[in-house]
Image (cartoon, rainbow, N blue to C red):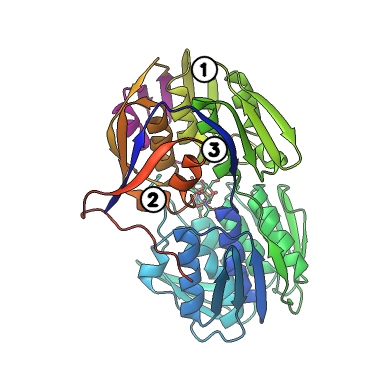
């Protein structure tokens, strides 16, 4: 339906602001089911995944109103305990409704979630954790039936620090009877933001952001308002654009602490980073240097969500960089598209070797997933000539108005109606 048409190798500069975090607001939206009454969320980005969550809430009976980047959600009147398959398949985060729905309605009927095709994405950690908290769960192929009169506290050891499973456990435990301890919990900042929202509503969550989290069940939660943290992956993506094409770029509205895992990579490339309050100034060298080894890890390691966008940057760096994607087993689908720009990348299982080239050349490419799509936009910004990027519905899941924001720092990028065969972009929901 639409493509981005990008004239590459333009000098970028100035200031670009980061919107609210997709991966923070999605679990918080699911958690609003636990709070009978009106919740107000500020700094909510306008993304298709957010709109998919809004549609699920509306299907369940909640009213959701958007006023610019503020959502007013009233969950006083929940009338359904099922989520239709097409809604579950819209994104990965639909699975996070399981814990809040079974807590609110004592029953939940869902099916396996969708989400980016970045490898096998099982939900065993989610389901086994809910069972430990006292839920009866029956699965038959694409239908998952979950029941619990009242969930109870438990000690849960996660074999992998899964972000989503940690979020589902927290959400399922805040109104459970007794205490829950999560060992080997995910430590991502989005977990802490979920906990700070729930604690502001009266929950008792201790240690969010650490690998051991304790939740003492309470009787009831009370409506409150919350401002969502900035999106650290969008911030990193804009930093990549700056490293590639700007002498100097200011990325506004960041949380410096959330960027600690990625700043050393930018300095190893030869960039200089200056922090002042919520602003980050990036000064890049004439030619970027390679980064010897990048291994993606759970937070506070190098984020897997930054792997593809950094790869686009290192495609033009001086020297050879080696990636090890240790989190997902299928997160290199963007490489075949990056090669169309002339990138010199070889893959062997989880290892990708990037030999930096001096020039990238225009190409017509298609997004394979959310962050893979962002990496193609970055490569197009750095390529000689005019490129196009299709399958924009992937990019719209996590980047609000990417063409508008990038054009404000000098990119020559526009949306063009070219084919009618591709998925349409999401429409803003009022
Ligand atoms: C969240 O996905 C993020 N999505 C992902 O961001 C991010 O890449 C990922 O965490 C890792 O940081 C949202 O927050 C909406 P996981 P999630 O459970 O929760 C395995 C983006 O681009 N696993 O931490 O699905 C799984 O297969 C998206 O914004 C199980 O084995 O990630 C993977 O190998 C992409 N069983 C690993 O854990 C389970 O039950 C990490 O998955 C769950 C996960």
Residue 117, label in figure: none
Q: Is residue 379 magenta?
A: no
At a point 60% along the width and 80% down the height, the residue shown is 75
Name the residue at 64% across, 52% down. 190
Give, as a single range, the part of the protein colored magenta.
327-354
Image spot of residue 280 (x, y percent): 67, 35
Q: Earlier in the sequence, mark 2 or mark 3?
A: 3
The spot of residue 346 in percent (x, y) is 35, 22
Q: Nearer the viewer, mark 2 or mark 3?
A: 3
Q: Is residue 87 above or below residue 373?
A: below
Mark 1, other Cα within 10 Å: few <14 / some 14–19 / many ≥20: many
Residue 275, horizontal then vertical, whole percent: 73, 33
Residue to which mark 3 is pinned: 238
Magenta highlight on residue 329: yes
Name the secondary structure under disc 3: helix
Of the numbered discs in the image, which one, if any, rests on residue 290?
1
To which residue does mark 2 refer?
394
């Amino acid at each position: 339906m639409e493509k981005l048409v990008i004239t590459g190798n333009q000098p970028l500069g100035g200031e670009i602001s980061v919107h609210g975090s997709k991966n923070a607001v999605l679990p918080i939206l699911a958690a609003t089911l636990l709070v009978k009454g009106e919740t107000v969320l500020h700094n909510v980005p306008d993304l298709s995944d957010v709109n998919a969550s809004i549609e699920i809430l509306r299907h369940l009976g909640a009213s959701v109103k958007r006023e610019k980047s503020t959502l007013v959600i009233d969950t006083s009147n929940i009338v359904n305990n099922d989520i239709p398959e097409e809604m579950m398949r819209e994104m990965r985060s639909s699975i996070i409704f399981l814990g809040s729905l079974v807590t609110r309605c004592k029953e939940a009927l869902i099916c396996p979630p969708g989400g980016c095709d970045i490898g096998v994405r099982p939900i065993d950690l989610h389901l086994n954790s809910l069972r430990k908290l006292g839920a009866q769960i029956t699965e038959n192929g694409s239908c998952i039936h979950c029941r619990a009169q009242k969930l109870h506290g438990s000690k849960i050891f996660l074999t992998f620090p899964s972000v989503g499973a940690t979020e589902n456990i927290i959400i399922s435990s805040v109104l459970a009877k007794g205490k829950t301890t999560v060992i080997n919990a995910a430590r991502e900042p989005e977990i802490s933001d979920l906990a700070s929202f729930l604690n502001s509503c009266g929950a008792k969550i201790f240690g969010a952001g650490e690998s051991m989290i304790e939740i003492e069940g309470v009787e009831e939660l009370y409506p409150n308002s919350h401002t969502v943290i900035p999106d650290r992956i969008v911030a990193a993506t804009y930093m990549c654009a700056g490293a590639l094409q700007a002498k100097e770029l200011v990325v506004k509205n960041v949380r410096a602490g959330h960027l600690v895992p990625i700043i050393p990579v930018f300095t190893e490339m030869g960039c200089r980073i200056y922090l002042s309050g919520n602003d980050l100034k990036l000064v890049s060298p004439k030619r970027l240097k390679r980064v010897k080894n990048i291994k993606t890890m759970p937070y506070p390691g190098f984020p897997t969500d930054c792997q593809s966008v950094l790869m686009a940057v290192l495609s033009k760096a001086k020297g050879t960089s080696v990636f090890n994607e240790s989190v997902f087993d299928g997160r290199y689908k963007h490489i075949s598209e990056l090669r169309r720009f002339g990138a010199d990348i070889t893959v062997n299982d989880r290892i990708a070797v990037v030999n930096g080239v001096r020039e990238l050349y225009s190409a017509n490419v298609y997004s394979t997933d959310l962050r893979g799509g962002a990496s193609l936009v970055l490569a197009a910004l750095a390529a000689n000539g005019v490129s196009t990027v299709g399958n924009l519905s992937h990019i719209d899941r996590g980047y609000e108005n990417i063409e508008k924001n990038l054009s404000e720092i000098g990119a020559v990028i526009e949306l063009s109606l070219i084919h009618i065969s591709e998925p349409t972009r999401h429409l803003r929901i009022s």
